[in-house]
Each structure stands twice: as C-alpha cells, then as structure tokens.
Amino acid sequence: MTTQRNIVFLAGIFPKRQQKFIRDNSIGVIQNAADAYQKNVIAGLAAQQDVAAVVVNLPFISAYPSSFKKAWYPAVTDHECGIVVEGRGFTNLSLIRYFARLLSALAGLGRGSAAAADAILVYSAHTPFMIAAVLAGRVFRRRRLAIIVLDLPEYMGAMGLAQTLFGGINRRLFYWLIGYFDRVVVLTQAMIPRLGLAQQDAIVVEGIAAANVGTMPPTEDADAPQSFLYTGTLALRYGIKELVDGFRMLDCSDTELWVCGAGEGAEYVAAAAVTDPRIRFYGQVDRARALEMQAKASFLVNPRGGEDDFVRYSFPSKVMEYLASGRPVIMYRLPGIPEGYDGYYLPISTPGANGIAAALSAALDLPATDRVAIGIAAQRFVRECKGPREQVQRIVELIYRD
C-alpha cells in the first residue's frame, strides 16, 4: 500500500481569478517566469498519485506605491490543476510588506489542510517565506522542510526600497535560514557547494517544461519574413543590447527581430525600432501572447552570455520554454546548462554582438528540413524528460529521502 504524502506548497503564483487585477495594477516588470515555474510545480504535484497537496499563496508582486497601485493585496481562494490555492491577503506598503507577508504566510501554514501537511515546500529565496516555513515546520511542529532556490540573493536585482536598504541583511539572513531546511532544490550543480549543502541533501532541477507548452502548432507563414524572437526581462546583463546590435549587423531586408518584455533595456530596444523598421518592439505581453508569438517565429533567441559570475548559478527559464515550443533555439552554451542539452539548440560560439550576428546568419542559412529536425528533437527531449510529472517526482523523492 502506497503511503500518502501531504505537502503544502508555499508559493507566489498569480491565481486565475486575480490575473487581471495584477496586470492592471502592476507598474513595470511582472514576474511571469516565476509564475510559470511555480504552476509547473503545482501541475507536477497534481500528477503524483501518492501526494495530496495544498498551496498557500502570496503572489510575487512589487511594492506600493512605486511598482504596484494598491497598498493592500486581497485574499482569494482558487484552484490550479485541481489543487486548492489558499490565497492570503497582505499589506503591500513598501518597507513593511516583508513583515506582513511573513505573518500572513505563517498564518496560512497553520490553518486547515496546510497545518496537517507533513512537509512544507517553499518557492524561492524569499526570506519572509523562509522564516514562516522554519517557524511552522521547526518551532511549532516537526515537519520536513524543502526549498526551491532558483536565484542566489546576491545576484538578484533590487526589488524596491526595502531590498535596496536591507539587501545585505537579507543575504545574510538567507544563508542562515538555508541551514534549517532538510532538502534544497537548486537550478545548477554549482549552487550546491555555494550554499554549503551536502550532495545528498540537494537535487538539480534546471527547469520544468510545461505540459501545455509546445502543443500549439507552428504557424510560420512561408511568404512572411524570417523572424527572430526574444521574450523576457529586458535586463542589460541578459544581453538584450548585444542581440539588437548583432541583428542590425545582418544585411537582410526581409528578416525581422521581435522583442517582447520590460526592463532597463526597453528604451534601447524602442530607440532601435524607430531607426530600423526590421525591429518590432511589442513591450510587455502576457504569457498567452508570448506563446503565440513563439509558435509564429522562425527562431527563438536567448542572448544571455556566460562571462558574468552569476551565470554559473543560472539556467534561464526561457530556455526550457523555448525548447518546448518546437522552434529552433539560438543561445550560448552557458555554464549552468547541463551537457545533455547539447545538440538541441543552435550555439552562439563567440561572445558579444559579433558572435550573435554570426549565429543569426548561420541559422538563416540552414535548410528548412534541418531547422524542423532541431526544433522537433528539442521539443521531444524536454517534454519526455523534463515535464512536470518527471521533475516534480524527483523533488518529492528528495523531500522524503531518509
């Protein structure tokens, strides 16, 4: 007889009932990639026959008044993949929101089916969640504690006034709290020694390919211009400037660059689009629109280079989404990408705009049959080996490993 495992997932997703509210009240970048990853975790939990799960949820929104229009975030109960999402309300006012989120998360972990769970799984290096889980799991009741760490706090961008003022304290607090967790899910192998973890207490889950991604059939118009697409945060450290500059080196009047996203590089992209009609800047789009554009583009590009130290601890979330699309992907062989991915993408061999230009040009020269074969092989690889059921099963096995 299979033993029932009861897991509460402390998360920050955008519930279906509140997506419009979040979109209408956000100022600047919306954390769509984090939302997608967490929903993939929930889908994986729902797919485990021996797991009963509940989600305690406080969405990852920015602070009022600088980046969000509301000072109070309302509670709502919703469902995701058949799992109950118990949304918690909290004060979103800058400086005090971290304490409000901690208290609200702690209260959520102590109620109903969440209180009865024998394991707590926390998403991200969000210290209010970490403190709440440690209190709920260690102080008030003995429960297994696990955390998914996709970003090290020292490499995360500033998230408002509180983070700017107290970032150093937050980093030290994170590294102290991580010692209270029994198991840790990390993005790359290099993160394990960086966090001071024993190998048996950690597992690398570089990403999760959503089950519903890649099901949209490619719709490229044979008569339309060839197109390169980038969707995601327009952070300069992610190579968006080099992508724009590299594309502009191409002498191809019938080729276009599509860019979707928000961030400090948006102004540069917008200015380039004014002077080069081949560049189309769409701004920040929702996930459904991004997936639609991925199905239409000729190639998907991730221009993040491997020179910076943080890249060793990074596996860009868009890589998994791109590979699952069935379109050929152009990117660097980053230090955080396992060797098993080799052959499933078109590599950028030389750093900088010149290297990107060469990779884009080589991609355009590929026969159509080769493009199709690369895209289909990558899609099959991530959907069969990196889907929610497979990846979350590994997480569950780690949590309950004796």
Image (tube, grey):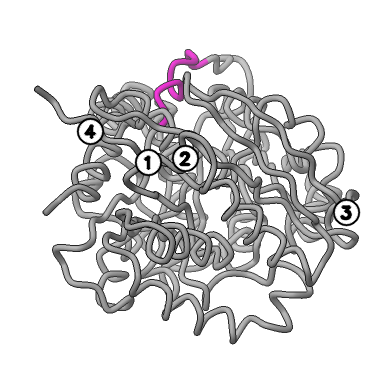
Q: Give the percent coordinates (x, y) of residue 43.
A: 41, 28
**Image location of residue 6, percent across then percent down:** 33, 36
Gap between marks 3 and 1, in whole Å? 31 Å
Q: Residue at 36%, 40% (x, y): give it.
A: 7
Give the structural element (helix, strand or loop) at label 3: loop
Where residue 91 appears, x then y in whole percent?
Answer: 80, 55
Which span is picked out in magenta? Answer: 210-218
Q: Nearer the viewer, mark 4 or mark 1?
A: 1
Which residue is tagged 3? 71
Residue drawn where x is 63% and y is 70% of the image: 157
Do the CB atoms of the residues marked 2 and 3 lie less than 8 Å apart? no
- Which amino acid does the dot numbered 4 rest on? Cys
Label 1 secondary element: loop
Say whether marks 4 and 3 touch (CB < 8 Å). Answer: no
Q: Are marks 2 and 4 in contact (CB under 8 Å)?
A: no
Mark 2 or mark 3, earlier in chain: 3
Which residue corresponds to mark 4? 385
Residue 348 relative to residue 69: left or right: left
How far apart, in angstroms, are the residues tagged by discs 2 and 3?
27 Å
The first of marks 4 and 3 along the sequence is: 3
Q: Mainly helix, strand or loop, the magenta region?
A: loop
